[in-house]
Amino acid sequence: NNSVIYTSPNTIEVSYGEIFYDDVSCFGNETRLTDCQHRGQGVHNCFHSEDIILYCTNNDCDDGPANVRLVNGSSPLEGRLEIQHCGIWGTVCDDFWSRKNSEIVCKQLGHPFSLGHTGSNVFPEGRGIIWLDNVDCRGKEESITECSHSGWGIENCAHSEDVGIICSKEDVTAELRLVNGADQYEGRVEIKIRGEWGTVCDDNWDFDNANVVCKQLGFNGAITYLPRAQFGEGRDRIWLDNVNCDGSETDLLDCTYSLGTHDCVHNEDVGVRCQNPNCTKDDLEYEGSGSLSLPGSIKLRLAGSNKTDRGRVEVFAHCQWGTVCDDGWDFKAAKVACRQLGFQTALSAVTMATFGEGRNPIWLDNVDCQGDEASLLDCGLISVGNHDCDHNEDAGVICLNEEPDIKIRLVGGNATAGRVEMFYNNKWGTICDNGWDINDAKVVCRQLGYNDASNATKRAFFGEGTTQKIWFQDLECRGNEGSLFQCDHKGVGKHNCDHTMDAGVVCFNNSQCVVTGVAEGRTQDSSAGQVAAIVIALIAIAIIVLLIMLIILLALWNRKLQKRINMMAKSDLAASELTTSGTPGKYAQFSNELEEQGESSV
């Protein structure tokens, strides 16, 4: 045989029996495999899934143009791609396969045009060797073998990745349309191929893909794309999946994609919203390819409420009002929106479409404000129109024309320390200790007229509140605010706490470490209370130790007393013996011995 081509792992069938050789290394001039270096017969660390497969041929293997064919298609224009090398037919892996690759193959077969490529679920899987992988054509090659690839037989594929080709005798530019939109600028993307309309799956769909669709439809570009069948589900076949455009294409079929093969259902039909050419530049501006931004000043409005100070936040862009997604929406963003609307501040940031779901585009998502910006556009956000939200996530606000005059008091301690209670909306309420820290305590103490705070207490240190209300949770003060209301929070009255989590403070003035006084309930501040608790604990320990020592002494004394009582009884018995017999008995002798030792008297 003149030539040998190898591939591994086993792509033919599972082998059985002994594995003879491993780590074989030949120079190429050996006449027998056993002349090559190896680990020894039967010595290996392999499985049969690693068996080597050899393809031998008597033909010369050159790098010239190779024969290609399309197999298992319904016509000579389509099928699984196979290529012949060294006289052996094999398949081609679909890794990084593009329409340019398909066009080279179709031209090599005498068909001037290509409709694209498919996967093995359209045309059955091949068997045997996989000849090529990572094929990359530039479009001017005359043969697929002139394109770059990993090398003959070098691949990391399975036959489930065999590429299929669909060729055409005539140039085909796919016809596109938008369906079920509010106007001609938006809708579900549908494509007509071979006279049949179908939808496009949203797998891997992005802004560049949407741009190509809108430009092909005659618009300047896309504003956004909408996955998950937001313009309703189609009823025809799903033509395209895994579309990947770089944004420069003029036709959707110039992008890479899977044609007619997919793993989608119609609830994944993709839609787009294209630019309205009647809008002026002042309505919308673009920065670079696929990057959409708004001018420095935008219009805001509140919708979904019969009150002028609250509602769903809507932004005017590209001649159309749209909503804001509540991802990242917080009190700081609400303050910016309210000031931009002409109010002084915000009462609350509202989420989850509290003021109803909008029906127009979702313009903003992941708004990240510091709270002092002049416009929502000054906050951090992703490109306008780019989001992963539904209208059940529309954000809203409750605004205030002036900051409420709230009162603060300390309860359960003294004049400088206690549980923090706030008077709002004619009711006293406590503060939850979630997120409670020294910066929050500093704001409270200054609001009470003290210079600073020395401690921020938690877990109802000054006792549980008896009010029904818990006004704040997760306060985020910087420490320099003039009121708790100016700190970031989740909204007045919004919490998931109970009164076991009531927050407290310890305040002081200037050089004072502890300020004494009498307030409601207690007469000690938290520091003194902690010291008192430690002293009480030490006294209790001392008392317990003394009691234990007393018990031990009583036990010893009782033992000694019992011993003396026993000795007295023995003395009495000895005296009785002497009286009875006239001679001392053994107990009398024992008593005399005790007297001699000076231990017999009690």
Image (cartoon, helix red, strand yellow):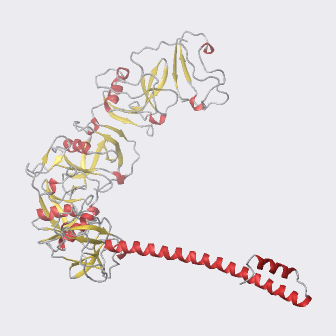
Q: Residue 126 appears at what percent x and percent y? A: 49, 32
Query: Closer to the camera, 504 or 163?
Result: 504
The residue positioned farthest toward the bottom in the image shown: 579
Q: Residue 43 appears at what percent x and percent y? A: 64, 25
Quadrant location of the C terminus in the rendered image: bottom right
Query: Closer to the camera, 96 or 566?
Result: 566
Query: Can you see residue 349?
Result: no
The residue positioned farthest toward the front in the image shown: 596
Name which quarter of the figure residue 538 lies in.
bottom left
Quadrant location of the N terminus in the rendered image: top right
Disc tally is: 0
Q: Is residue 142 left or right of residue 10?
A: left
Q: Is residue 2 left or right of residue 350?
A: right
Query: Can you see residue 248?
Result: yes
Q: Residue 72 appears at what percent x and percent y? A: 46, 33
Name which quarter of the figure residue 298 lies in.
bottom left
Query: Closer to the camera, 306 or 375?
Result: 375
Q: Is residue 335 left or right of residue 36?
A: left
Taking 318 as reference, is 314 above or below it? below
Q: Residue at x 38, y 21 (%)?
A: 145
